[in-house]
Image (cartoon, rainbow, N blue to C red):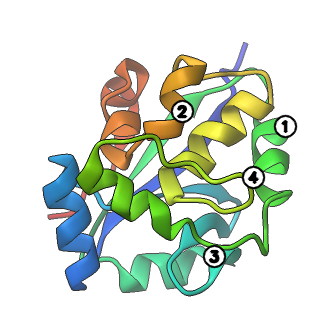
Amino acid sequence: MTMKTVRLFFSTTRWPLSAAIRAATWSRWSHVALVDGETVIEAVAVHGVRRAPLAEAIARAASFAFVDLPARDPAAVLAAGAAQINKPYDYTALIGLALRRDWQARDAWFCSELVAWSFEAAGQPLLRSEVVRRVTPQHLWMLPPMQQMALAVTP
């Protein structure tokens, strides 16, 4: 029996916002996205939730890693994320990093919130429901299955 997985793309850039997110979350990563074939489903500042070419995501990264996370129904996770396309970026999440408060807005997304919520909406929660409102890329990176299945970490 082949294990089903959802591939996640973790990354950093050389932009100051990336450094600020990494510092505030004590994380190697400032961004995480769902990989759907040759595209990513991601929440990014300015653009909000979008589908972008995977090659473009890799090109803008200063460092990146792919992680295959076990999932019962990968298509449901990707469909949940895709259903959020065109919703705005959750800038209040950035404020929440500094204030240590819950930040998830009803119709806007921070990258890691989108990923965690997509799994939860597909009936495959990664974290306790009350934690999804404060999830950072570091929280997703620290999940035990990810530590075992990390692929191709770049310097």
In space, the residues marked 3 and 1 are separated at their CA atoms by: 21 Å
Give the residue type at disc 4: Gly
Q: Nearer the viewer, mark 1 or mark 4?
A: 4
Give the residue type at disc 1: Ala
Q: Nearer the viewer, mark 2 or mark 4?
A: 2
Give the residue type at disc 2: Val
Q: Residue at x 80, y 30 (%)?
A: 122
Label 4, on which residue? 81
Q: Nearer the viewer, mark 3 or mark 4?
A: 3
Q: Nearer the viewer, mark 3 or mark 1?
A: 3
Image quadrant in which you'd find residue 37 = bottom right
Q: Residue at x 67, y 25 (%)?
A: 71
In space, the residues marked 3 and 4 are separated at their CA atoms by: 12 Å
**Along the viewing direction, whichever of 100 and 151 lies nearer the viewer:** 100
Position of residue 75 measured from the top left corner of the image (x, y, whole percent)? 83, 41
Question: Is residue 31 something that shows in the picture?
Answer: no
Q: Earlier in the sequence, mark 1 or mark 4?
A: 1
Vertical comparison of 48 with 66: above or below: below
Label 2, on which residue? 132
At numbered mark 3, what does the secondary structure look like: helix, strand or loop? strand
At numbered mark 1, what does the secondary structure look like: helix, strand or loop? helix
Q: Earlier in the sequence, mark 2 or mark 1?
A: 1
In space, the residues marked 2 and 4 are separated at their CA atoms by: 14 Å
Label 1, on which residue? 76
Q: Nearer the viewer, mark 2 or mark 1?
A: 2
> In the image, 29: left or right of 26?
right
Vertical comparison of 117 with 35: above or below: above
Give the residue type at disc 3: Gly
Image quadrant in which you'd find residue 94 = bottom left
Q: What crowding class fits label 3: few (fewer than 14 Cα within 10 Å), some (14-19), or many (20 or more)?
A: many
